[in-house]
Image: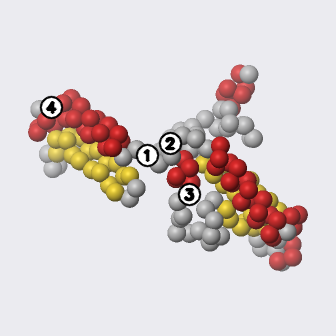
Amino acid sequence: MDNEASRTHGWLVTIQRRGVIHRKHFSDGVFGGKQKAFAAAKQFRDDIIAKFPPFSLREYSSIVKKNNRSGVVGVCRYCASETRDMPEEKQRWFWVASWPLPSGRRKRVKFSVNKYGEEGAFKMALKARKDALKKLDGQFDPGASRRGRPRRAKNDETPMSEARAA
């Protein structure tokens, strides 16, 4: 963080864990130079991560968001966009289960209300999510979805470049 206008030079570490923000500035001047300030900032970061590890994917997947309307995390009712403006009897509704993948992407599976009935589609979505969460392993990485990730082949978790090479 270098700001000539305020003559501020240093490193800023910000980590949020379970609703608490841990933030500290490491000034180049106070720490005796850019390299020493950087080393101190990295040590602070490592200490915070060791003391407050990130959520597991399972823990993160169980957080109830304020926009949840189904009452179940990761399960929602969805109307196919191409039918949304049609009369109600022609609309296609689904119950959708979703969960995060280790890559930062999300997997979604939908169950037709027309095909399985309201309750049947809902129960299938619940089961799909529950089964997927049992297999979920690893830590939640909040930056994973923002980083440039290779495109995935449909129904495959291998990057397209690897899929072509195979």
Q: Residues within 10 Å of mark 4 (few under 14, many from 20)?
A: few
Residue at the spot 28% in from the left edge and 35% down from the top edge: 42
Between the residue at mark 1 and the residue at mark 4, the CA separation in whole angstroms equals 31 Å
Counting from the top left corner in percent of width and height, residue 164 is at 73, 26
Q: Earlier in the sequence, mark 3 or mark 4?
A: 4
Determine the secondary structure under disc 1: loop
Amino acid type shown at disc 1: Pro
- Image marks 3 and 1: residues in contact by CB distance under 8 Å: no
Between the residue at mark 2 and the residue at mark 4, the CA separation in whole angstroms equals 34 Å
Between the residue at mark 3 and the residue at mark 1, the CA separation in whole angstroms equals 14 Å
Which quadrant holds the N terminus? top left
Which numbered marker is on residue 62? 3
Which numbered marker is on residue 33? 4
Determine the secondary structure under disc 3: loop
Q: Earlier in the sequence, mark 1 or mark 4?
A: 4
Residue at the spot 61% in from the left edge and 62% down from the top edge: 73
